[in-house]
Image (spheres, rainbow, N blue to C red):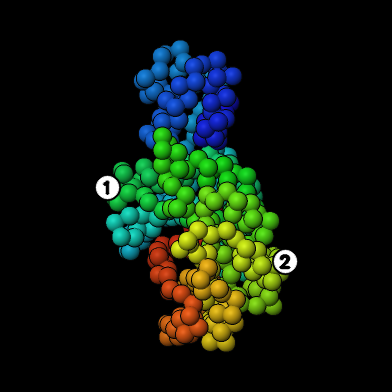
Amino acid sequence: MINLLDLTYDELQSFVVDDLKQARFRTDQIWQWIWQKGCTDFEQMTNMGKELRALLAERAFIFHPSIDRAQVSRDGTVKLLLRLHDDKLVETVLIPFNDRYSQCLSTQVGCAMACTFCNTGQLGFERNLTMGEILGQVLVGRQYLADNDLDPLRNLVFMGMGEPLLNLDNLLRALETLPSTKGLNISWRRSMVSTVGFPEQLRKLGETELALPAISLHAPTQELREQIMPKAARVHLDDLMRCLNEFPLRPRERITFEYLLLKGVNDSLKHADQLAKLVDPKRMKVNLIAYNATEGLPYEAPDREQVEAFEKRLWKHGVTAFIRRSMGADIMAACGQLKADQQK
Ligand code: SF4
């Protein structure tokens, strides 16, 4: 049995034509049912005959993750804990912004990178998500917004549980599927992939031109990165920067650096000066995020004034930098917190 959400358009076409011996145009019909209409029941595919619907039900299924738990923050952020077919749990977060929502997607169950400030990192790695499981989050998120009369979904960030570039094959299949005008119709300009940075995979992502990267940098020197992100730092900062300086960008596009400010660890003005030295202002910008203290992790939230002084210092060096609101802090929106809480 095949989950139809795991097939790219071309794969669905060969399933329809070669395996089911059906006319090619059926591919478009099925594709629209599953991606545009979010259909999970072949019986609802009323523009196809009974026999074909029965054949599909015999050979395939359409699986949407179920919502195990939903939490809505005072600021409108919605966090969904999703249950997959094998009972594994992943998180997705819907973040409101200017009459639209952005959705943060997971790409793995758990994560192998073990960044010392991250809840997901403490859970360890379990498995990769398939393309259908990655995009199934979008279908469930979109439906949740519609069911609750909320604003539509516009942007996607691959920034949830897991390291997307360590699940590159499924990530690229998902990115290829998103822009289909007969399907989800989310153009590549509206997707961003957050990664700790692997040069070879970044080069492949760059070649596809399907999404821009956001680099989880969090430290301006190799030494400090080794301390707070020891596994990510196995890629030397010099090699990462070399790769980013060569990353293909179109006019006005920039690579984002994500920088989580941890009190007394990486939030001094000296760190801001070091960070500014790394950033090419014409090709890169910085998002600053103030860490939220989390039970069981050894870090503290930075002082507000320090965060502002850090941002100001970057601007002084000519670097575009913004302080990002830490959305959903009251519902544990930091990656992996809801799942960790559920497991307790
Ligand atoms: S911050 Fe990202 S890469 Fe690091 S452990 Fe957490 S999920 Fe993995």
| Helix, strand or loop status at disc 2 | helix
Please identify the quarter of the rendering in which residue 179 is found.
top left
Q: Amino acid at mark 1?
A: Asp
Please state the horizontal and vertical placement of residue 20, each as a whole percent of the image.
Answer: 55, 17
Please state the horizontal and vertical placement of residue 236, each as a whole percent of the image.
Answer: 71, 69
Q: Is residue 336 visible in the rendered structure shown here?
A: no
* Residue where numbered disc 1 is placed: 149
- Name above or below for residue 43 compared with residue 73: above
Any atom of ligand 1 within 8 Å of the CB at mark 2?
no
* Residue where numbered disc 2 is placed: 234
Please state the horizontal and vertical placement of residue 282, each as a whole percent of the image.
Answer: 51, 71
Q: Is residue 130 visible in the rendered structure shown here?
A: yes
| Helix, strand or loop status at disc 1 | loop
Q: Amino acid at mark 2?
A: Arg
Labels 2, 1: front one: 2
Answer whether labels 2 and 1 touch (C-beta < 8 Å): no
Mark 2 or mark 1, earlier in chain = 1
Rounded to the nearest whole Å, what is the CA distance between mark 2 and mark 1? 45 Å
Q: Residue extending furthest front?
A: 251
Rendered residue at 63%/57% (across/down): 202
Which is more toward the observer, 53 or 186?
186
Please state the horizontal and vertical placement of residue 279, each as a whole percent of the image.
Answer: 56, 74
Which is more toward the observer, 313 or 166?
313
Rendered residue at 57%/66% (across/down): 216
Q: Which quadrant of the figure contains the N terminus?
A: top right
